[in-house]
Image (cartoon, helix red, strand yellow):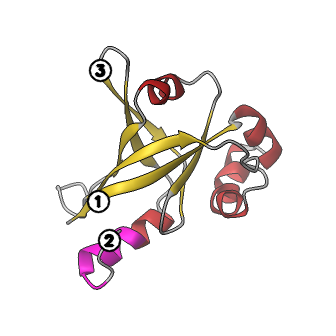
Amino acid sequence: MFDLDSPAGVRADRRLRAEEVLWLTTVRADGQPQTSPVWFVWDGASFLLYTKPDAQKLRNLAGNPRVALHLDSDGVGGDVVSIEGTASVEPDPPPAAQADAYRAKYQPRLDALGWDAAALAREYPVAVRVRPVRARAW
């Protein structure tokens, strides 16, 4: 997806593997974009995130699976990572508590919040997979 021979591509891939929060933009039925911060895992080909079953983003995705994903910039407009993709609800995902990469990435945050992985899986049981179609980094 990113040109890993370019400095911007290498930075983008590294950030997508390390950053804890990604901004997910979906579109409501009335055309209004809605952006939400989400926890995610990037495996080099797609994004995995978990959400609550009553989340507006799921209703948005049911009507329009096209999404945008963004990382925060460096604060002055540099180090930008922007991805456009298609999202789908995973039919038979492992619960967040059993998704090894997801659990490993967020266990320190769960510990800091006083949560356990089982509580996370109960609260956020719906897995969404985003497959990129276009990406930009600069």
Q: Position of residue 79 (x, y in %)?
A: 25, 64
Q: CA distance from mark 1 to mark 3?
A: 22 Å
Q: Position of residue 63 (x, y in %)?
A: 43, 24
Precedes in sequence: disc 3 or disc 2: 2
Q: Secondary structure at mark 2?
A: loop
Counting other residues with Cα less than 10 Å from the Cα at mark 3, is it few (<14), some (14-19), or many (20 or more)? few
Q: Which residues are magenta?
A: 5-13
The residue under label 2 is: 2
Q: Secondary structure at mark 3?
A: loop
Instruction: Say above or below: 8 vs 71.
Output: below
The reply to whether discs 1 and 2 touch (Cβ–Cβ < 8 Å) is yes
Marker disc for residue 32: 3
In the rendered structure, the answer to whether residue 94 lies left or right of residue 105 reads right
Q: Secondary structure at mark 1?
A: strand
User: What residue type is disc 1 on?
Assistant: Ala
The reply to whether discs 3 and 2 touch (Cβ–Cβ < 8 Å) is no
Residue 117 in magenta?
A: no
In the rendered structure, the answer to whether residue 24 lies left or right of residue 48 reads left
Q: Quadrant of the N terminus?
A: bottom left
User: What residue type is disc 2 on?
Assistant: Phe
